[in-house]
């Protein structure tokens, strides 16, 4: 997921990046913990709210 407007993650993480605490909505993205292609799903429990640059780094480690 690469949507900056993800109300579920925005609410779950209080509108802040799970790692940095950044609250600038324009740079926040919903990231999947386990990719759909690897058996994950588009569910709140499989997501994190991350700042865009951290999301890119997280995906590189997948």
Image (spheres, rainbow, N blue to C red):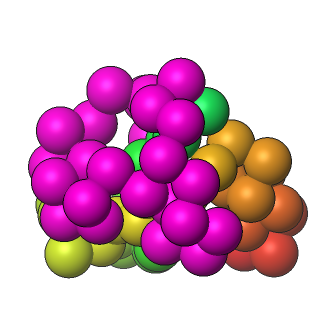
Residue at (79, 48) in percent of width and height: 53
Kindly identify the residue that appears in the image at 42 percent across and 57 percent down: 16
Q: Quadrant of the C terminus?
A: bottom right
Image vertical order of residue 15 relative to residue 24, above or below: below
Q: Residue at x 41, y 66 (%)?
A: 48
Q: Is residue 27 above or below residue 55?
A: above
Relative side of 43 to 58, left or right: left
Left or right relative to 10: residue 17: right
Q: Within the image, what quadrant is residue 61 found in?
A: bottom right
Left or right? Give the position of 47 relative to 31.
Answer: left
Q: Residue at x 16, y 54 (%)?
A: 11
Q: Residue 32 appears at what percent x and percent y? A: 44, 61
**Percent x, y for residue 45?**
20, 75
The residue stretch that appears in magenta: 1-26
Residue 35 is at least partly visible in this image: no
Quadrant of the drawing holding the N terminus: top left
Asked whether 25 falls inside the magenta stretch, the response is: yes
> Of 40 and 31, which appears nearest the observer?
31
In reply to whether residue 4 is colored magenta, the answer given is: yes
């Amino acid at each position: 997921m690469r949507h900056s407007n993800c109300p579920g993650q925005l609410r779950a993480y209080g509108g802040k990046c799970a790692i940095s605490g950044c609250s600038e909505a324009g740079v926040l993205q919903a990231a999947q913990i386990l990719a759909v292609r690897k058996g994950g799903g588009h569910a709140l429990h499989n997501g994190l709210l991350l700042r865009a640059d951290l999301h890119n780094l997280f995906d590189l480690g997948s």
